[in-house]
Structures are given as structure tokens and as C-alpha cells.
Image (cartoon, rainbow, N blue to C red):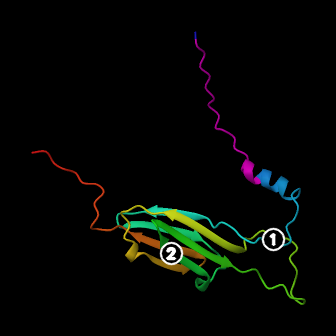
Amino acid sequence: MATILYNNRPALRPARAFNSVLNELLRDTLPAVNQPAKSFVPQADILESEQGFELHLAVPGVVKEDVKIDFQEGNLVISGERKAPAADENAPKFRRVETAYGTFTRTFRLPETVDVTAIDAQLIDGILRVTLPFDSNKVTKHHIEVR
């Protein structure tokens, strides 16, 4: 005979997530980085709507003149650089660096349904928004009704 156990008390969840507690514990044991890195990988979100895709790339502190977007052999290549503050004699010195500096490159394989001639990009508030509209001449889905 099987025994079924039922707990009618709500699950008690700690006030902080385990990851944040672990990060807090490890933060002080890791060596402090006092020099900016030479490269980084920006985080990306990809959204899809009826009109096409929208790519959001988090690049805080990057100016639009330092971003380059190319389409090569079916790939969208986004590259650029976030420059670290100049290190001259009178400037403050880094004691700890937790932000990302240096060059970056992200490559995204685009489906054939994207109209590459209509791709548009805007850099607003540290988010690079790249719109990738669908090509209305290419059909990927079509329902055929049986008569």
C-alpha cells in the first residue's frame, strides 16, 4: 500500500535567494580586480513579433560612434568598444572593477525570412535596439485549405 504525504503548510522560502547569498559569500574571497578587462560579452534579448525580430543588446556607456553593425554571409555581426576612463597621473586609480570595459563582438545567425536591407538600429539609454523586419516576399508558412 502506498503512503501519500501531504504538507498543508506553505513552503517557507528564505528572504534572499540562494544565489545572492552565495555571491555575497564569494565576493569577499575572490581577488579584487583593479584593472579593466580588455573585452566583454554584452547581454542580449531577442523578441519576436508579427513584423519581425527585435534584438536588444545591453551596452551601457558605449557611444553610437563606437558601435559597428555588419551583415556577412547570413550573420549579423555587432562589435564595438566601451572605453575605460583614461589613466593619467592625476586621475583616480581603480580599486575594484565590476563593470565591463573593452571591445565586444556578438554574432547572430539570421533566418532567410529577415529583410536585411530594412534592418534598423538605435542606441538609447545604453540599450542597442536592432529591428529585423520580416521580408514580406518570402513565405515560410502557408495553410492550404482542402476543397
Q: Which of 53 and 25 is in front in this view?
A: 53
As drawn, the label of residue 97 is 1
Which sits earlier in the primary sequence, circle 1 or circle 2? 2
Looking at the rendering, in which quadrant would you find the C terminus? top left
Q: Is residue 135 magenta?
A: no
Quadrant of the snapshot with the N terminus: top right
| Tag count | 2
Left or right position of 137 against 79:
left
The span shown in magenta is 2-20
Taking the view exactly as shown, the residue that stands out farthest to the bottom is 90
Image coordinates of residue 88 in percent, x first then y, are 86, 88
Please give the name of the residue rendered at 77% of the width and 70% of the height, measured from the top-left corner: 37
Q: Residue 18: x, y in percent?
A: 74, 48
Q: Residue at x 18, y 50 (%)?
A: 144
SS class, disc 1: loop
User: For residue 49, what is the image quadrant?
Assistant: bottom left
Residue 37 in the figure: left or right of residue 129: right
- In the image as oriented, which residue stretches furthest toward the left? 147
Q: Which amino acid does label 1 sit on?
A: Val
Give the crowd class for mark 2: few <14, some 14-19, many >=20 residues within 10 Å: few
Q: Residue at x 61, y 26 (%)?
A: 6
Residue at 40% of width from left, 72% of height from top?
A: 116
* Disc 2 residue type (three-letter): Asp
| 146 is higher (above) or lower (below) than 93 | above
